Amino acid sequence: MDIIERIKQQVEGNPIVIFMKGTPQMPQCGFSARTTQALKAAGAEFAHVNVLADPEIFQNLPRYANWPTFPQVYINGELIGGCDITVDLFESGELHKMVAEAKNQQPKAAAH
Amino acid sequence: MTAARVEMIHQRLTAALAPEHLTIIDESHKHAGHAGAQSGGGHFAVTLVSKAFSGQGLLARHRMVYDALGSAMHTDIHALSIRAFTPDEFNPH
């Protein structure tokens, strides 16, 4: 499958997905660690893609999203940002709302 | 090396965004030894106050900073923490 298609499937097939270095259980980067902590604290259930284990995604995701760094968090198919923005949204209470809304919506790509 | 990078970041951000306030902190030393640091790119934290951010959301502001830094995001900068404010947000009346 085309790499861009593969990224799209992850982004659109999960209500919330984080592309990160390492895993939520064993993050390999402080920014990825802080971002997953914010998501968890906001009550999110989320999918993750370990970009260190998938060199193709590591190389192509920045181009896909026009966003040069990791982690990247997508809610309902849209990039919300990296570590700084996710933590900002958590601190302002906005992330809780976005997470709650995502739970109520099923993205089209996930419907079989 | 490090001072030259900070200077380069300063020049590019100043040219593109005309910030009223700009601080750049080199945090590379905090991350020496971790996997990402081996590529040679530095870790930096920037705080900018600029009128250019007025009416822009967080995502757009970060993209403006990334765009201003351009190719350096792929070469000299491994990680960048960004705090971007408008003058009104930075000095609330």
Image (spheres, coloured by chain):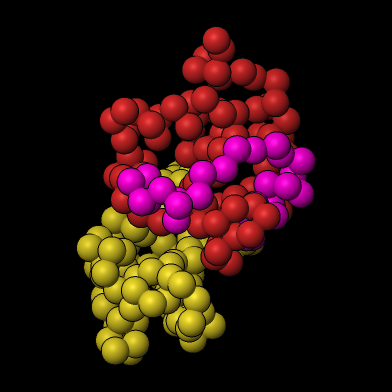
Chain colours: A red, B yellow
Magenta highlight: main SS: helix
Start-end of magenta stretch: A33-58
The quadrant of the image that shows the N terminus of chain A is: top left
Q: Residue at x 33, y 46 (%)?
A: A56
Q: Position of residue B75 (x, y in %)?
A: 26, 69
Q: Position of residue A24 (x, y in %)?
A: 64, 52
B83, B28: nearer the viewer: B28
Quarter occupied by residue B1 = bottom left
B76, B20: nearer the viewer: B76
Question: Is residue B29 visible to the viewer in this orientation of the structure?
Answer: yes
Q: Position of residue A14 (x, y in %)?
A: 56, 29
Q: Position of residue A37 (x, y in %)?
A: 70, 55
The quadrant of the image that shows the C terminus of chain A is: top right
Question: Is residue B21 visible to the viewer in this orientation of the structure?
Answer: no
Query: Is residue A88 part of the magenta span, yes or no?
Result: no
View extreme (top): residue: A112
Q: Residue at x 54, y 65 (%)?
A: A29
Horizontal arrangement in the rendering, residue A6 relative to residue A86 (left or right)? left
Image vertical order of residue B69 relative to residue A7, above or below:
below
Image vertical order of residue B36 relative to residue A24, above or below:
below
Horizontal arrangement in the rendering, residue B7 relative to residue B23 (left or right)? left
Query: Is residue A57 part of the magenta span, yes or no?
Result: yes
Image vertical order of residue A16 relative to residue B5, above or below:
above
Image vertical order of residue B47 relative to residue A24, above or below:
below
Quarter occupied by residue A95 = top right
A9, A76: nearer the viewer: A9
Q: Residue at x 31, y 50 (%)?
A: A59
Q: Residue at x 68, y 47 (%)?
A: A39
For the image, the number of numbered tags is: 0
